């Protein structure tokens, strides 16, 4: 990581923390909604209600996903900068093979 500056490292660190937060949210969503499905099936199988929670929370989960990953689906400025840096490094290696 020595060829990255402090600002780039901190930015990536915050991105990784955001990803970790999303994956934790996703895991909780799956575990709790699976539990609600089981409770609904055992206690009141004739009336399905767990899907309301799953749908409502799912909207929040989708929003969290968009905040962490969604904006990066399209070719963002960050993607452009990363691509330029990659191409410059490739060109540099071509000119100065080790």
Image: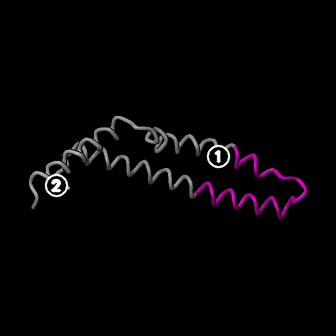
Q: Secondary structure at mark 2?
A: loop
Q: Count neighbours of disc 1 (C-alpha within 10 A) and say few if under 14, some if 14 to 19, many if 20 or more.
A: some
Decide which of 66, 14 is in the foreground and name it.
Answer: 66
Residue 74 location, x and y as percent?
45, 38
Q: Nearer the viewer, mark 1 or mark 2?
A: 2
Residue 41 location, x and y as percent?
82, 62
Q: Quadrant of residue 35?
A: bottom right
Q: Is residue 77 above or below residue 12?
A: above
Circles 1 and 2: CB distance less than 8 Å? no
Mark 1 or mark 2, earlier in chain:
2
Does the stretch in magenta take in 53?
yes
Q: Which mark is residue 58?
A: 1
State the residue lying farthest toward the top: 77
- The residue under label 2 is 2
Q: Count neighbours of disc 2 (C-alpha within 10 A) and say few if under 14, some if 14 to 19, many if 20 or more.
A: few
Q: Which mark is residue 82?
A: none
Q: Secondary structure at mark 1?
A: helix
Residue 83 location, x and y as percent?
29, 43
Q: Quadrant of the C terminus?
A: bottom left
Q: Report whether 78 appears left or right of 66.
A: left
Give the extent of the magenta segment.
28-55
Q: Residue at the location (34% across, 34% down)?
A: 77
Residue 70 location, x and y as percent?
49, 41
Q: Residue at the location (81% across, 50% down)?
A: 49
- CA separation in Å, label 1 and label 2: 40 Å
């Amino acid at each position: 990581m020595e060829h990255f500056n402090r600002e780039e490292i901190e930015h990536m660190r915050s991105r990784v923390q955001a990803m970790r937060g999303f994956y934790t949210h996703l895991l909780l969503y799956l575990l709790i909604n699976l539990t609600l499905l089981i409770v609904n099936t055992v206690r009141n199988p004739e009336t399905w209600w767990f899907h309301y929670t799953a749908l409502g929370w799912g909207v929040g989960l989708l929003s969290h996903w968009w905040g962490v990953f969604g904006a990066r689906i399209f070719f963002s400025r960050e993607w452009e900068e990363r691509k330029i840096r990659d191409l410059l490094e490739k060109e540099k290696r071509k000119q100065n093979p080790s």
